[in-house]
Image (spheres, grey):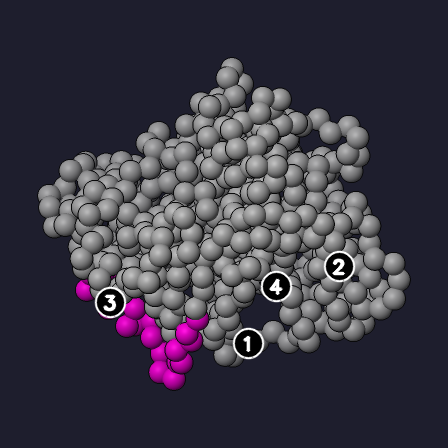
């Protein structure tokens, strides 16, 4: 097996991929800055000249600053390969890390160095992105931008300091591979953990299509790219205020308790690679209208279908920490634990002021940590596929009694719902108040009719970079001009919603016609992706690059 070292990849070959990436960093600018007269607003990208390269000296200096004395090196070996996966009542052929779904959890302590060697036994090139981590840029795992893709039969070692405790995960950044079985949790433990709890449960939510009746994510994308003909789901009106979720009352939209009257369907025309998976009529008030593009046959919790769910065991009175991760491709999940309230302690790895809730909404890529003091019995942890009239299920058992039915919908799903815009950062991680030095505005554009998702009307091009400079306070303004919701994700940083006091996050839901402001300090040099974490939207063009100027 041929092995790529980091130096070999970045020094000998990355320039050949993605438009001569590192060589271009020393060339002249090929674009216009788009700055206003004060130099604060950028709405047009620049060409590749004059940007910090992924393996530049600035990147090494930032990584050195993250390193802490006493940290250990955690070595892990993972193999990405085609395999058979038991989903519980259904076995499918897919791609995964090992033969487990989700992949085996990786756990380190903040300050440790993770050295994970990925061996690629897939028929395609692949990569590994560390979702939510502030890490060195050449380890971020974006082919044609920060590294060369790992070819079939090759391997690559990702080595970086895990500086910030929290709930994270990893997945490819190569085509639609994330919508197969290639994902796993990454838990960075806090050596000074302030929370007190007896047990911990890592819960990964997913929507599943791969290997079911011949379907593949690539075939799904090919079908979606044909569009919906005359059905225009874009070009909606836009509210330029700080639009958030509608929390009025307890009517959160149709959860589809009655499956017999299911209004949304997949298109009748079959697509190559299996039956049609295009979804029509999936709506949610909570998501501002259209809930999603893909009619998945299964919704999973920790890789299991509701008919054969995972059971987590504890004792009555135990205090449980549940780490929730939405690894789905096209589905927001509304989550509740029957018979219990949850106390939210973290979102996207960072602590918040504790808030109690009955239910949570997670867009793709989002994570929440909650604490629950468990009662005596058997209880459903239900993850409703928002607007799609289906759900995933796991079971918490502390005593006797019948297991919850697969179709159970606990009352808490219609109770108090907490979303990120109603949370406040813990004072220890609150972004200090500061006027933005630069505002970068992203209009989210496109429609289901043409399936032409983009940012500022431009489909992804790795040579287009929106410039920032180290030391700046940067405001990202996401303006959703479409009639679909988009979970927007920034690599290599966390931002604060609502200025400095909002929760620290790396993924935020932007509702149709709304604007979300996200502020961050530019303290991690390199070339960083910004994209919608709907796999099919990003692969159709809704992603771009934020680049640090030299």
Q: Earlier in the sequence, mark 2 or mark 1?
A: 1
Which label belongs to residue 202?
4
Badge 2 marks a residue whose secondary structure is strand
Q: Earlier in the sequence, mark 2 or mark 3?
A: 3
Question: What residue would you read off at disc 1?
Answer: 193
Which label belongs to residue 395?
2
**Nearer the observer, disc 4 or disc 3?**
4
| Residue 309 x/y as whole percent | 72, 55
**Nearer the observer, disc 2 or disc 3?**
2
**Nearer the observer, disc 2 or disc 1?**
2
Q: Quadrant of residue 231?
A: top right
Residue at x-position 61% and y-position 63%: 202
Q: Residue furthest front?
A: 1
Q: Horizontal placement of 165 versus 472: left or right?
A: right
Viewer can see residue 176: yes
Label 2, label 4: how many angstroms apart (C-alpha)? 13 Å
Q: Quadrant of residue 274?
A: top right
**Nearer the observer, disc 1 or disc 3?**
3
| Residue 470 x/y as whole percent | 25, 57
Residue at x-position 47% and y-position 55%: 81
Magenta residues (range): 55-76
Indicate whether residue 240 is drawn in magenta.
no
């Amino acid at each position: 097996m041929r092995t790529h070292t980091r130096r070999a990849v970045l020094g000998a070959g990355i320039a050949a991929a993605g438009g001569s990436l590192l060589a271009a960093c020393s060339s002249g600018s090929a674009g216009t800055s788009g700055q206003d007269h004060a130099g604060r607003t950028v709405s047009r990208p620049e060409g590749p000249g004059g940007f910090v390269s992924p393996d530049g000296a600035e990147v090494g200096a930032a990584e050195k600053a993250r390193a802490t004395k006493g940290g250990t090196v955690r070595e892990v070996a993972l193999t990405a390969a085609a395999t058979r996966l038991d989903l519980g009542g259904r076995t499918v052929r897919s791609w995964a890390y090992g033969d487990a779904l989700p992949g085996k959890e990786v756990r380190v302590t903040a300050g440790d160095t993770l050295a994970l060697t990925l061996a690629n036994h897939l028929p395609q090139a692949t990569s590994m992105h560390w979702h939510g981590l502030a890490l060195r840029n050449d380890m971020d795992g974006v082919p044609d931008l920060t590294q060369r893709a790992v070819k079939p039969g090759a391997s690559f070692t990702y080595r970086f300091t895990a500086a910030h405790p929290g709930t994270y995960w990893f997945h490819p950044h190569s085509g639609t591979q994330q919508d197969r079985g290639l994902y796993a949790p990454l838990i960075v433990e806090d050596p000074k953990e302030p929370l007190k709890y007896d047990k911990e449960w890592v819960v990964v939510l997913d929507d599943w299509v791969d290997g079911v009746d011949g379907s593949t994510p690539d075939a799904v994308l090919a079908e979606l790219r044909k569009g919906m003909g005359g059905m225009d789901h874009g070009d909606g009106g836009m509210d330029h205020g700080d639009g958030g979720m509608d929390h009025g009352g307890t009517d959160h939209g149709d959860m589809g308790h009655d499956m017999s009257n299911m209004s949304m369907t997949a298109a009748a025309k079959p697509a190559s690679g299996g039956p049609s998976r295009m979804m029509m009529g999936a709506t949610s008030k909570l998501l501002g209208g259209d809930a999603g593009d893909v009619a998945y046959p299964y919704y999973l919790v920790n890789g299991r279908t509701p008919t054969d769910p995972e059971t987590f065991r504890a004792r009555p009175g135990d205090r449980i920490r549940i780490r929730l991760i939405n690894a789905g491709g096209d589905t927001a999940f509304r989550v509740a634990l029957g018979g219990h309230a949850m106390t939210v302690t973290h979102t996207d790895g960072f602590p918040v002021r504790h808030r109690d809730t009955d239910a949570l909404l997670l867009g793709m890529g989002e994570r929440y940590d909650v604490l629950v003091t468990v009662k005596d019995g058997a209880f459903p942890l239900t993850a409703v596929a928002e607007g799609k009239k289906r759900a995933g299920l796991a079971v918490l058992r502390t005593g006797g009694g019948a297991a919850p039915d697969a179709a159970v919908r606990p009352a808490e799903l219609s109770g108090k719902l907490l979303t990120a815009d109603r949370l406040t950062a813990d004072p220890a991680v609150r972004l200090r108040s500061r006027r933005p030095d630069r505002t970068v505005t992203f209009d989210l554009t496109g429609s289901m009719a043409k399936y032409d998702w983009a940012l500022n009307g431009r489909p992804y091009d790795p040579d287009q970079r929106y410039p920032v400079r180290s030391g700046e306070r940067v405001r990202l303004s996401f303006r959703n001009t479409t009639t679909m919701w988009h979970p927007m994700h920034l690599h290599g940083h966390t931002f604060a919603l609502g200025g400095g006091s909002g929760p620290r996050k790396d993924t935020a839901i932007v509702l149709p016609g709304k604007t979300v402001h996200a502020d961050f300090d530019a303290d991690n040099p390199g070339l960083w992706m910004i994209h919608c974490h709907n796999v099919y939207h990003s692969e159709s063009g809704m992603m771009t690059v934020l680049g640090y100027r030299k």
